[in-house]
Image: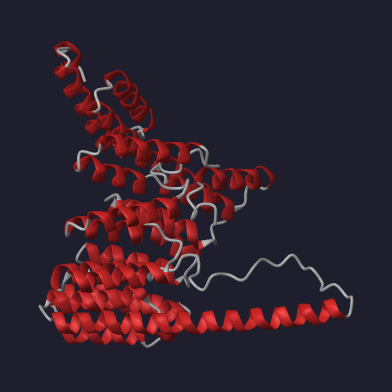
Amino acid sequence: MEQEDGNISTARQILQHGLRRNPNDAHLLQGLGNIELSSGNDVAARRYFRSAIQANPEFPNPHHALGTLEHSRGRIRVATSILKKGLKSCPANHRLHHALGDLYRDAGLFDLAESSYRSGLAHGPNWSRPFAYTALSYLSYEKNRDLDACRNWLRRGLGINNGLHSQGWIALAHLEESEGLIVEAREVYIEAITRYEMILAKKRNLREGQGRQDEKHNMQMSQTSIRPPSNGAKPAIDPVRSGDKWMNVYKSWAQFEDKHGSYRTANDAFSRGTIAFPRDWSLPLQWACLQVKYGMKERARKLFAVACDRAGSSHADPYRLYAEFEMSQKNYSRARSILFLGAQSLSVSSDGGLGNRGDLARLYYTWAICEWHLGDIIRAEVLFDHSLRLTDAGENGSEIRSLILYAIARLEYARGEYLLAQHC
């Protein structure tokens, strides 16, 4: 939960505290590996995943995490070895079969990929089947462009678990769009969103009904002078649960409408998504960018402010993008205030703003550019230096580091410091 809220450092500390008590706990090692991976530290992630495998070879998650990491980094032979080794220890794990199928599919070994996906289907629980069916639809498209088979696989997956497999809906809509069937693609999105919002409404009604029953029960207990028992239970969970991927369906729908529909239809898609996910900052942020595109500047400002408010002390991007918008309007003083607020919010968070160092480095880079425009060269230099210190070492931080060094070189050149510019 701390990691999902952006408190990476706090999440890391909790797991490390547990690991000091249980140094061979594979689940804790796996969790630390996931945190390092999300922070861009591949070396530490690999180390934790290997330690987790060594601690408990029959625990499938680290095999899967390490195999998919190596696959994503293009180390195909290493990834294949890890996943096959994992399947020897955990032959009935559907996620390992699926990951091996993805690897074979990317390598063009379609028959082996299909065999792996079907093995995953045979071993997996019912809720996992839509993932396998979606993968088989991708395989049908890549193997021989069999559109009917693609649609059949996807619809088969969407017939399970009340059609809550968000990835399947996105894949089906993308398939129709890629074939130029815009009306059909829009119908897929509307069918998906309507079904999801109906399920949300049912959950909300159930929660409110339970709340009314609890209130009535507590009132009855208070009238008899008996205090209701306290069991330390937490408040009811919001119907939009942690890890809900349906946000991506709303984003995909909004992008589709922006491309094939109109400002109004894209606006409606973002509006419904923002209502469905009242705590998420990324949807109002993308919605603000839509307003900028269509010249709706005041609406954009309101939505940027909503995104910043929702992000709070956990994410730098809303503040940075809001400031960049104001800079594009030549409102550099206003941009400076936004950047200062973002840096201040992140610096006082429990995570120290370092959950994603790359995002914070970009915020300070933008702030330095802003100060340069305002004529405060000394502060710009300090902020560039701070941005560099927050940049990840090695290849992970190479892009932002190059951008910062190039900006510093331009600054030094503008000041007439040609030798310094040359060495940046």
Apparent side of residue 79 relative to residue 179 in the rendered image (left or right): right
Residue under the image location 33 percent in, 70 percent down? 271
Residue 56 in the image, given as x and y percentages of width and height: 57, 56
Residue under the image location 34 percent in, 60 percent down? 284
245 above or below 361?
A: below
The residue positioned farthest toward the left in the image shown: 180
Q: Is residue 287 visible?
A: yes
Residue under the image location 24 percent in, 23 percent down? 375
294 above or below 170?
A: above
Q: Nearer the viewer, residue 192 or 134?
A: 192
Residue under the image location 33 percent in, 81 percent down? 192
Q: Is residue 115 visible?
A: no
The residue positioned farthest toward the front in the image shown: 298
The residue positioned farthest toward the right in the image shown: 225
Apparent side of residue 206 relative to residue 115 in the rendered image (left or right): right
Count of numbered marks:
0
Apparent side of residue 384 relative to residue 199 in the rendered image (left or right): left
Q: How is the image coloured?
A: secondary structure
Residue 12 in the image, given as x and y percentages of width and height: 55, 45
Look at the image and tell me in which quarter the C terminus lies.
top left
407 above or below 208?
A: above
Q: Nearer the viewer, residue 195 or 263?
A: 263
Residue 298 in the image, given as x and y percentages of width and height: 27, 55
Look at the image and tell me in which quarter the N terminus lies.
bottom right
Q: Nearer the viewer, residue 105 or 340?
A: 340
**Quarter of the rendering containing residue 374:** top left
Q: Nearer the viewer, residue 262 or 132?
A: 262
